[in-house]
């Protein structure tokens, strides 16, 4: 057993069997610039409370797994330099050596399962990168979804990825991909994409039922809920496509590889959209937080 440091709020929620929604911290340390990162993180936590659930932001701080961050911890993490980006491969090493790291989707799912939390909200999952046929860059998030029983609410996968290949890998791995309220797989900053989602559901209750049914069947792995960004906040994909292409070309020219690829591309797109990608990113994370809270409430029998 490893020690978990619970925030007071999450500890109380666990004791009272209240619905809890996990949140990742890589989006804070590697996905958004300071100071918007800590403002957004606090806002998203509040959205979850306003929707009737309790937020549990995950991080490893000085070798201790934190499930729920106190406001001070969150502020410190959002400003800290050189925080590790933790996935399945390096989370245990960080815990064992007393390090500090932010959790990606994969590591957040591991932490959530360990803490008994079944629903998790984020922005976008990692996936199959463009050019993966030569780079082999496929996010560990996909394999995590195949083996850890947490329902992850995201706005699809980031449009910097090869979305068609990402869907193929998820299908191969047996991960249910459920679009919320529409037939298309959403593309993060854009609500729609030319790709059909394999499954569609229109209510948090159905998603919770599907989660419980997988558990009853003894199936390993989670569900990916692809929740489209609200239409008024999106950046149309034809506007974004050339910007993504140029960011990808820059990343290739600078030989950015491994964990550095996603943060590099997000930063280039932020610069080239003059901050609009961040505004959209904030809107979609908040939207996902609200849906995740509804799913968590439905799972604990508290839906209205
Ligand atoms: N979504 C964002 N910004 C991010 C990420 C997601 O809007 O920074 C992070 C998540 O933590 C996700 C990770 O798990 O990027 C994927 O990284 P990689 O492609 O290196 O697996
Ligand atoms: Mn990668």
Image (cartoon, grey):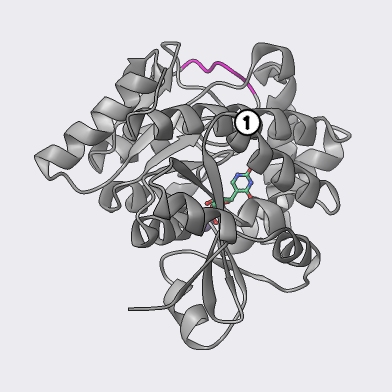
Instruction: State the count of labels.
Output: 1
In front of the other: 254 or 201: 201
Image coordinates for residue 150, horizontal then vertical, percent: 35, 45
Q: Quadrant of residue 92?
A: bottom left
Side of 102 relative to 209 (left or right): right
Residue at image x 82%, y 30%?
276
Q: Residue at x 66, y 12 (%)?
A: 231
Q: Is residue 34 left or right of residue 217?
A: right
Query: In the rendered structure, which segment of residues is drawn in magenta?
Result: 190-194
Disc 1 target residue:
50
Label 1 neighbour load within 10 Å: few <14, some 14-19, many 20+: few
For this view, does 271 lie left or right of residue 233?
right
| Residue plotted at (65% across, 33% down) | 47
Q: Quadrant of residue 75?
A: bottom right
Q: Which quarter of the image is occupied by the C terminus?
A: top left
- Say if residue 198 shows up in the picture: no
Residue 143: percent from the left, percent from the top? 33, 52
Ligand 1 within 8 Å of the CB at mark 1: no
Q: Quadrant of the N terminus?
A: bottom left
- Residue, far left: 217
Q: Residue at x 38, y 35 (%)?
A: 224
Quick check: is 188 in the magenta stretch? no
**Location of residue 184 with respect to 240 vertically, above or below:** above
Q: Is residue 30 visible?
A: yes
**Is 192 contained in the magenta span?**
yes
Q: Helix, strand, or loop for circle 1?
A: helix
Q: Quadrant of residue 207?
A: top left
Pinpoint residue 20: horizontal percent, then vertical percent. Answer: 46, 44
Query: Looking at the image, which is closer to me, 143 or 133?
Result: 143
Prevalent SS, magenta region = loop
Q: Nearer the viewer, residue 109 or 260?
A: 109
Name above or below for residue 182 compared with residue 274: above
């Amino acid at each position: 057993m490893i020690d978990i440091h619970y925030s007071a709020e999450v500890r109380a929620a666990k004791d009272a069997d209240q619905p809890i929604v996990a949140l990742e911290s890589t989006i804070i340390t590697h996905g958004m610039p300071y100071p918007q990162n800590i403002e957004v993180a606090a806002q998203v936590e509040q959205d979850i409370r306003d929707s009737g659930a309790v937020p549990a932001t995950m991080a490893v701080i000085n070798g201790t797994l934190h499930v729920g961050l106190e406001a001070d911890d969150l502020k410190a993490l959002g400003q800290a330099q050189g925080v590790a980006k933790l996935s399945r491969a390096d989370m245990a090493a960080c815990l064992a050596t007393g390090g500090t790291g932010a959790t990606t989707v994969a590591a957040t799912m591991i932490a959530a399962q360990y803490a008994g939390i079944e629903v998790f909200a984020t922005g976008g999952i990692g996936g199959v990168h463009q050019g993966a046929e030569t780079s082999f860059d496929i996010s560990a998030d996909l394999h995590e979804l195949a083996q850890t029983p947490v329902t992850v609410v995201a706005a699809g996968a980031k449009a910097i990825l090869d979305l068609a290949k990402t869907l193929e890998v998820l299908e191969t791995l047996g991960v249910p991909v459920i679009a919320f309220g529409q037939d298309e797989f959403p593309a993060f900053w854009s609500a729609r994409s030319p790709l059909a989602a394999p499954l569609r559901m229109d209510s948090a209750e159905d998603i919770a039922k599907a989660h419980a049914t997988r558990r009853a069947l003894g199936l390993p792995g989670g569900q990916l809920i692809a929740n489209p960004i609200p239409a008024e906040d999106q950046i149309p994909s034809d506007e974004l496509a050339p910007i993504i292409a140029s960011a990808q070309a820059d990343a290739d020219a600078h030989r950015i590889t491994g964990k550095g690829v996603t943060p590099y591309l997000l930063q280039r797109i932020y610069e080239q959209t003059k901050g609009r990608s961040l505004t959209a990113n904030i809107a979609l994370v908040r939207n996902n937080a609200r849906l995740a809270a509804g799913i968590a409430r439905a799972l604990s029998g508290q839906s209205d």
